[in-house]
Image: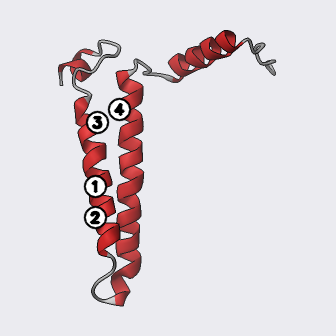
Amino acid sequence: MEGIAEGDGGGSGGYWWWAAASTVQLVWGIHSYRRGFAGDSRFMPLKAFAVASLFVGATASATVGTLRASGIHSVGDAKELGESIRTELGIPPKARDE
């Protein structure tokens, strides 16, 4: 976890934890979904919410891990990346309302 503690601006050091977390959540969600509902019907909404939360959590941790590993740590970094992509594609800059 040295990459996270040092804030080195990217790379794969330490970010395998995010990949592992998202993988475990996704596998657990798929397993729970395939197993289906068993037990008292009063707990069905709670179990459905729990399975949905596993899928949302897997997506969130995979997204955060990807962004951090690629060096995007703030909204400003994301905006710069977007501007760079637009420039490379030859799309004119957006008009700003001020």
Question: Residue 11's spot in the image, x, y percent?
Answer: 30, 16
- Under circle 1, the secondary element is helix
Q: Quadrant of the C terminus?
A: top right
Amino acid at dot 4: Gly
Mark 1–mark 2 Cα distance, whole angstroms, equals 6 Å
Question: Residue 46's spot in the image, x, y percent?
Answer: 37, 74
The residue singled out by tag 3 in the image is 18
Asked if labels 3 and 2 touch by Cβ distance under 8 angstroms, the answer is no
The residue singled out by tag 2 in the image is 31
Amino acid at dot 3: Trp
Q: Quadrant of the N terminus?
A: top left
The residue singled out by tag 1 in the image is 27
- Under circle 2, the secondary element is helix
Lower position in the chain sequence, tag 4 or tag 3: 3
Asked if labels 4 and 1 touch by Cβ distance under 8 angstroms, the answer is no
Lower position in the chain sequence, tag 1 or tag 4: 1
Q: Quadrant of residue 15?
A: top left
Question: Residue 86's spot in the image, x, y percent?
Answer: 68, 16
Q: Residue at x 35, y 13 (%)?
A: 9
- In the image, is residue 86 above or below residue 38? above
- Under circle 3, the secondary element is helix
> Which label was assigned to residue 3?
none
Camera-nearest label, 2 or 3: 2
Camera-nearest label, 1 or 3: 1
Amino acid at dot 2: His
Q: Residue at x 35, y 68 (%)?
A: 33
The residue singled out by tag 4 in the image is 65
**Residue closest to the far left:** 1
Question: Residue 36's spot in the image, x, y percent?
Answer: 33, 76
